[in-house]
Image (cartoon, rainbow, N blue to C red):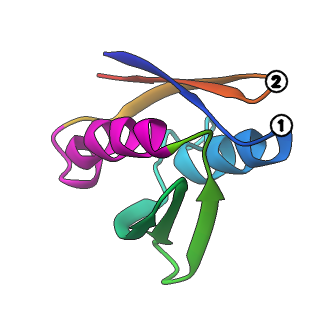
Amino acid sequence: MKITISCEDKYEAQKLASLIFIKDAKETFITSILNIVENEIVVSLRDKSAHSILLKDSTHVENFADFIQSVIDKEHKIIETAISEQDVEIVKG
């Protein structure tokens, strides 16, 4: 399954991609979604830290939350991420 998420800018896209997936270890750091406020999503990581990511709009936030939930529930794993300007393409399997 593949999705493309648009972030507010290139920096937010890089932040999202780095928090989602570490290529060498094939790991996902996000453990839960703590809060959603309009176009902002706050996620919790394995180290118990919280990070805010600004997406393009609330539709992208909802799509990302739906997509990442099965990864958080360990039903799927992130296989790959790719950044193109403010867009992040995420592939899970």
Query: Residue at image x 44%, y 60%?
Result: 30
CA neighbours of label 2 inside 10 A, class few (<14), some (14 to 19), many (20+): some
Q: Which of 88 and 76 is in front in this view?
A: 88
Query: The residue tagged with tag 1: helix, strand or loop?
Result: helix
| Magenta stretch secondary structure, dominant | helix
Give the image location of residue 38, x and y in percent. Answer: 48, 58
> Which residue type does callout 2 highlight?
Glu
Residue at point 50% right, 68% down?
42
Earlier residue among tags 1 and 2: 1
Q: Is mark 2 on a helix, strand or loop?
A: loop
Q: Is residue 31 above or below residue 64?
A: below
Can residue 79 be found in the magenta stretch?
no
Q: Which residue is drawn at 61% across and 67% down?
A: 52
Q: Mark 1 points at which residue?
A: 10
The quadrant where residue 3 appears:
top left
Quarter of the picture containing the N terminus is: top left
Mark 1 belongs to which amino acid?
Answer: Lys
Disc 1 + disc 2, Cβ < 8 Å: yes
Q: Which mark is residue 80?
A: none
Q: Name the residue under label 2.
A: 85
Q: Where is residue 10 in the image (x, y as percent from the top left)?
A: 83, 37
- Alpha-carbon distance for marks 1 and 2? 5 Å
Q: Check the picture and name the quadrant holding the C terminus.
A: top left
Residue visible at 72% across and 42% down?
8
- Is residue 92 depicted above or below 75 in this figure? above
Boundaries of the magenta span: 58-75
